[in-house]
Image (cartoon, rainbow, N blue to C red):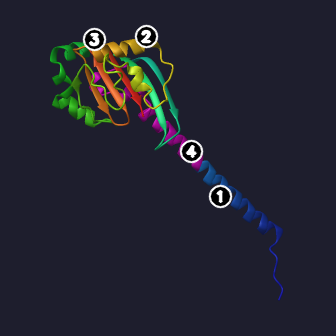
Amino acid sequence: MTTQREPNIVRGVKAFESLFGCLGVAVFAVLFFSATYAIWHVVVLDHRKRVPAYLQVSKVLYVKEESWGFGPGGNETGLLVYELPADVAAAIGGKGLSFLTDNDNALKARQQLDPNFEWYATPVAPAFGWKGDGHTPPSISLFLNRYGFGLDFDQRFIAMADQAKNASGNFYSYGSGGRLLIVSPALRKVIFAYSG
């Protein structure tokens, strides 16, 4: 029995089809992951989207963050400080906790990526392994370095965060993923710290 050999042109066409099939898959993969990264960058990594929309922050004053690893088991640490608009600061100063928990603001928060904001009046009650020595209020630095992944933060912003979390008249919320959000109408600042 003899086997008929394909002509060179047929083998060349099949190789060409195979090559372009692989290139098509590769191009699709590159486009898909590029689009996914762009969406992630705009929606998730936009610093303004990390705080409730009703705080109306638009100016980020300080950002320092780092990530080690990815997904479950990965660690990340960060400190972000935002300017709180004067009218929002005045409204919070006037209404207090009710401004942060009213129905309209709760509805707006539910429309965000991380809607779980349970607000409390300061001083911040230390939790999650950063209680300090029990004699003086612990620094936010302990919170940011509680898993050993601390960064060299600008001490002016650490002092500001410590002042905001220890003074009365401010508000805070612990959240999933090791998040602490502090709103200070007197300082006109919103402080977002995370360590997880």
Report how far apart the C-alphas of labels 2 and 4 lie in the structure.
Answer: 42 Å
Of the image marks 3 and 4, the number of the one nearer the N terminus = 4
Q: Nearer the viewer, residue 108 or 89?
A: 89
User: Going 68% across and 56% down the picture, which residue do you hit?
Assistant: 20
Residue assigned mark 4: 31
Q: Which residue is mark 3?
A: 86
Q: Secondary structure at mark 2?
A: helix
The residue wearing badge 1 is 21
Q: Which residue in the protein does label 2 denote? A: 156
Q: Nearer the viewer, mark 3 or mark 4?
A: 3
Can see residue 154?
A: yes
Q: Can you give x and y, in whole percent of width and height, for residue 161 in the image?
A: 36, 16
Magenta includes 50?
Answer: yes
Q: Nearer the viewer, mark 2 or mark 3?
A: 2
Please state which of the two labelled residues, at mark 1 or mark 3, is closer to the viewer: 3
Q: Position of residue 105 (x, y in %)?
A: 21, 29
Q: CA gap, disc 3 to disc 4?
A: 43 Å
Q: Whole-Å distance between the Cαs marked 2 and 3?
A: 21 Å
Magenta residues span 29-58
Q: CA distance from mark 1 to mark 3?
A: 58 Å
Q: Is 124 covered by the magenta stretch?
A: no
13 horizontally vs 111: left or right = right
> In the rendered structure, which amino acid carries the disc numbered 1?
Gly
Q: Residue at x 30, y 10 (%)?
A: 187
